[in-house]
Amino acid sequence: MAENVIRLSGRIDTSNAAEWEKTITEQLSGETENSFDADELEYISSAGLRVLIKVRKKAGSEIKIFNVSSDVYDIFDMTGFTELFKVEKKMREISVEGCEVIGKGFYGTVYRIDPETIVKVYNTPDSIPIIEKEQRFAKCAFVKGVPTAISYDIVRVGDNYGSVFELLNADSFNDHLINEPEKFDELLHKYIDFLKVVHSAEMDAGTIPMARDIFIGYLDVIDSYLTSEQSVRLKELLSALPDDLHMVHGDFQMKNVMLVGDEPMLIDMETISTGQPIFDLQALYVTYISFSEDCPDNLSSFLGISDDLGEPIWNSILEKYFDTADKAELSAINDKIRLMSAIRFLYLLAVTDLKNGDLGERRIKRTQDHISELLKKVNGFEI
């Protein structure tokens, strides 16, 4: 439905409240949603607030007030208007020109804008719902004891939006791996220990989606790349997984795990869900192995690490997470993770431009081959 925007400006108080009531009433629409743009509103008194209440009753539906300055927002908040109207603060505008890029992924790019602050700028101009979801998910994880950076502001960056975090002198595990390669084993131990901490957190039912259900949804998207038998079998394997409320980050690669001093902290929380550890491990396999299979320089271009580190990182993750060097046991676990990762990798290809061109075709064919091979060996996803 189209939106009818009514612009508020200047000061609305006793001296002009009646005039504003008449003006706004004349502009109300009964056919579309009504909203107020408060970008030029400097002040509103109790008389002005009463006008808005009358208008809301006449409209007979919820009215959004957006581009509200901090001072005016405080008035709305103190008087309880944020309970009656959907009130949105005016966003700060910032520039990331010349800022250090500290992370880049499917959803956006993370910049350090000063020594204490980072901003994640999303790729699309309609990203506000994604940012708000990430803020909500981060708070859910934080109250369960998972150290995570929580966004305290949403800003405009050119035509797009960004989410601002305070991260005092923080560097990612990926940065440390690049700058301190001699500490590979120590870093991987700390990294995997933190992953286990994340997986030990149990979320409240209904607050976070289940990874199992998300992956079943992926099957609908990639159905055209699978045989009917493969699609049915993969859905059976996923559906057999029990409900599980333990936290899954969804993209735990080392650029998304920061070290603040000596303490790990998570960023990029829009992908979190609940489920078994395989749902995080498959994402790590995709990052460190799948993307590089047909693109050998992927790790250096995407993560800035040596391309020959992919397999050592993955093997170390596997051994340290399961605390075993038993090759037969690790091989069986690895097959399950590889099959799960093939579902997600094929989904990522299907929903992005990565499916295009010769590289996309090779990746799709290789992933299809993996699924065909692994379905002969994997009888369940529990690990």
Image (tube, grey):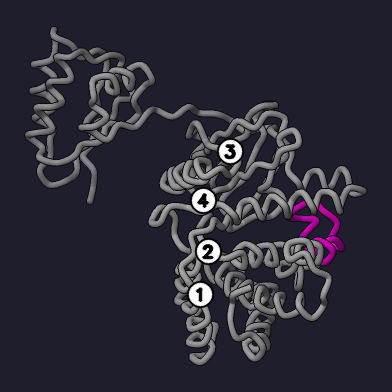
Mark in front: 3 vs 4: 3
Residue 149, numbered circle: 3
Q: Residue 150, how many percent across, how many down?
A: 54, 37
Q: Residue 23, how many percent across, how many down?
A: 12, 24
- Extreme-right residue of the structure: 182
In three-dimensional space, the C-alpha distance between marks 4 and 2, rounded to whole angstroms, equals 15 Å
Residue carrying label 2? 275
Q: Label 2 near label 1: C-beta < 8 Å?
A: yes
Does the magenta run of residues contain 303? yes
Q: Which residues are magenta?
A: 298-314
Q: Label 1 is placed on what type of residue? A: Leu
In three-dimensional space, the C-alpha distance between marks 1 and 2, rounded to whole angstroms, equals 9 Å
| SS under mark 2 | loop
Which numbered disc flags the more N-terminal residue, 1 or 2?
1
Query: Is 26 situated left or right of 96 in this image?
Result: left
Residue carrying label 1? 241
Q: Label 4 is placed on what type of residue? A: Glu
Does the magenta run of residues contain 377? no
Which numbered disc flags the more N-terminal residue, 4 or 2?
4
Query: Is 23 situated left or right of 303 in this image?
Result: left
